[in-house]
Amino acid sequence: MSAPDSQYSTTPYAGGNQPAPATGSTPGRGLGIAGFVLAFFGPAALIGLILSIVGLVQSRRAGRSNGFAIAGIIISALVLLAVIGLVIIGAIAASQVAETCQQLGPGSHVKDGITYTCS
């Protein structure tokens, strides 16, 4: 048997093109992403808000940042405010239509250029 050539090493080459070792997952990141996605879907924004808050709390306990959770909280809050505002506007409009129909009685009526069909 011959001795190994000195130019070949038994140690693998650890050149500069190697990826960095994984540092582990960020706790709460998945919840933050899920909350961020749900934030854009109207009433589901409430679930998105909850998931984002839980994800942010988990990340902070681990000493990590979680941008998706923060964005999910902000967007969910804005969407929920918009949904609540639209529900209030819809309720006011429905009560005004009901009041107008009560005054006009059953049938089809035109008042101020708006056609009301009351039953």
Image (tube, rainbow, N blue to C red):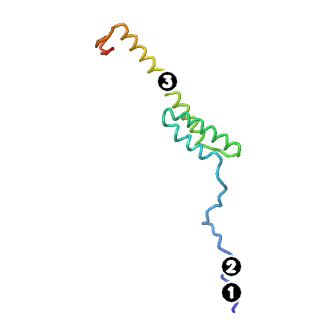
The answer to which of marks 3 and 1 sits earlier in the sequence is 1
Q: Secondary structure at mark 2?
A: loop
Residue identifier under label 3: 85
Q: Please report contact status of discs 3 and 2: CB closer than 8 Å, yes or no.
A: no
Residue in the image at 60% along x and 66% along y = 17
Q: Which amino acid type is shown beneath numbered disc 2?
A: Thr
- Furthest residue in direction bottom, as rendered: 1
For the point 67% across and 56% down, the residue is 23
Q: Are marks 3 and 1 in contact (CB under 8 Å)?
A: no
Q: In which quadrant of the rendered image does the N terminus lie?
A: bottom right
Q: From the image, tell me which residue sits under label 2.
A: 10
Label 1 Cα neighbours within 10 Å, binned few <14 / some 14-19 / many ≥20: few
Indicate the quadrant containing the C terminus: top left, top right, bottom left or bottom right: top left
Q: Position of residue 19 (x, y in %)?
A: 61, 63
Q: Is residue 32 left or right of residue 119?
A: right
Q: Position of residue 56 (x, y in %)?
A: 64, 40
Q: Which mark is residue 4?
A: 1
Rounded to the nearest angstrom, the CA distance separating label 1 from label 2 is 9 Å
- Circle 1/circle 2 CB separation < 8 Å: yes
Gap in angstroms between the C-alphas marked 3 and 2? 70 Å
Give the crowd class for mark 3: few <14, some 14-19, many >=20 residues within 10 Å.
few
* Mark linked to residue 53: none
Q: Secondary structure at mark 1?
A: loop
Residue 37 point in image, percent of width and height: 52, 41
Three-letter residue code for mark 1: Pro
Q: Going from the N terminus, do you reach mark 1 or mark 2 first?
A: 1
Choose top left, top right, bottom left or bottom right for residue 104. Answer: top left
Residue type for callout 3 = Gly
Taking the spot 67% from the left edge, 43% from the top edge, the residue there is 58
Real-space CA distance between mark 3 and mark 1, rounded to the nearest whole angstrom: 79 Å
Q: Quadrant of residue 31?
A: top right
